[in-house]
Amino acid sequence: MDTPNLYKRTVFISPLLLFLFVALACTAPSSYSQVNVDDNGVALKGYDPVAYFTMGKPVKGDEQFGYDWNGARWLFASQEHKNFFMASPEKYAPQYGGY
């Protein structure tokens, strides 16, 4: 293969690859959640994210203290923990959405 033909193919393929990459990125699934959730949309498998900081251990949350934030349902062991989270969710939510 001679050099001019290789150059023509490279010039043509580069924009085509760029177009395909952009098209693929724009068609990402819309069901993607910023937070790792279970089938019911609950984050952390129902564990209280504040308890890790205040009690130093995992504690199951209760639906009566549920709170919807960032596309997920967060459960807490108490109203106090829910209030802490509502005041500063970034402080208590896991990094990278728990992924």
Image (cartoon, rainbow, N blue to C red):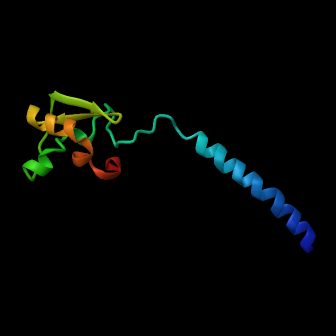
Q: Residue furthest left?
A: 55
Vertical comparison of 3 with 92: above or below: below
Rendered-image quadrant of the N terminus: bottom right
Q: Name the residue at 20% across, 29% down.
A: 66
Residue 83 horizontal/vertical position (percent): 14, 34
Residue 9 horizontal/vertical position (percent): 85, 62
Residue 64 horizontal/vertical position (percent): 14, 25
81 relative position to 4: left or right:
left
Q: Name the residue at 65% across, 50% down.
A: 21
Q: Nearer the viewer, residue 81 or 75?
A: 81
Quadrant hosting residue 32: top left
Q: Name the residue at 28% across, 30% down.
A: 68
2 relative position to 96: left or right:
right
Q: Residue furthest bottom?
A: 2
Vertical comparison of 9 with 88: above or below: below
Total numbered labels: 0
Quadrant hosting residue 37: top left
Residue 79 horizontal/vertical position (percent): 10, 31
Q: Residue furthest front?
A: 87
Q: Name the residue at 32% across, 33% down.
A: 41
Vertical comparison of 11 with 74: above or below: below
Q: Is residue 78 visible?
A: no
17 relative position to 77: left or right:
right
96 relative position to 26: left or right:
left
Quadrant hosting residue 51: top left
Q: Is residue 80 visible?
A: yes
